[in-house]
Image (tube, grey):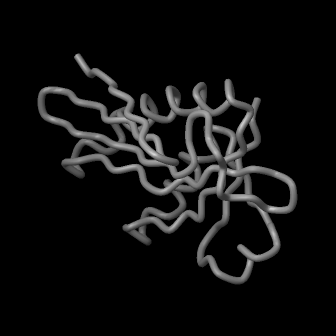
Amino acid sequence: MAQIHKSEYGDSVSWLLTDSSVDASMFVRGSAEFTLNFMVGDVPYVFFNRLVINPTSARGHGYGSMLMAVAMVYFDERRLTILNPMNPYDPARADDTLRFFQKFGFKDAKIGYFDDVTTGHLLQRLPR
């Protein structure tokens, strides 16, 4: 049975999912009772950094969705907006990656400075 562990340190939070043969992790900058250091205008953002599922054969079996569900509750409770400059490691799966994030409420965002420095999609998720 999969177990999820959360760690907070500095301005970051991470989740680690462990199962008998799978390791999955998620890392987000700007966490908890944050002194948020990511601001766009007067809106504080957390910065979605990474979601990793290993081995790659475990992708598509719900582990990433389990992590995302827990993380989205965490950020919703804190009323925080998430930025995700989506740069998939496997460009051939970019459409699948985009659909995955859209399933959790991420949408394309155009936010000033970030328009010029990201490639691919800049995604944003507002708290629910």
| Residue 42, above or below 68 | below
View extreme (left): residue: 20
Q: Position of residue 16 (x, y in %)?
A: 31, 35
Placement of the C terminus among the 4 image quadrants: top right
Q: What residue is rendered at 31% in x and 45% in y?
A: 59
- How many labels sit on residues? 0
View extreme (right): residue: 42
* Quarter of image, res 33: top right
Query: Would residue 29 appear left or right of 123 to someone viewing this image?
Result: left
Q: Position of residue 45 (x, y in %)?
A: 70, 51
* Quarter of image, res 63: top left
Q: Where is residue 84 in the image (x, y as percent from the top left)?
A: 60, 57
Camera-side residue of 34 and 23: 34
Q: What residue is rendered at 67% in x and 58% in y?
A: 38
Q: What residue is rendered at 22% in x and 16% in y?
A: 1
Query: Would residue 75 appear left or right of 9 to someone viewing this image?
Result: right
Camera-side residue of 126 and 78: 78
Query: Would residue 58 appear left or right of 96 to someone viewing this image?
Result: left
View extreme (bottom): residue: 116
Q: What residue is rendered at 75% in x and 59% in y?
A: 39
Camera-side residue of 63 and 36: 36
Query: Would residue 93 appear left or right of 98 to someone viewing this image?
Result: left
Q: Position of residue 48 (x, y in %)?
A: 54, 53
| Residue 71, above or below 25 | above
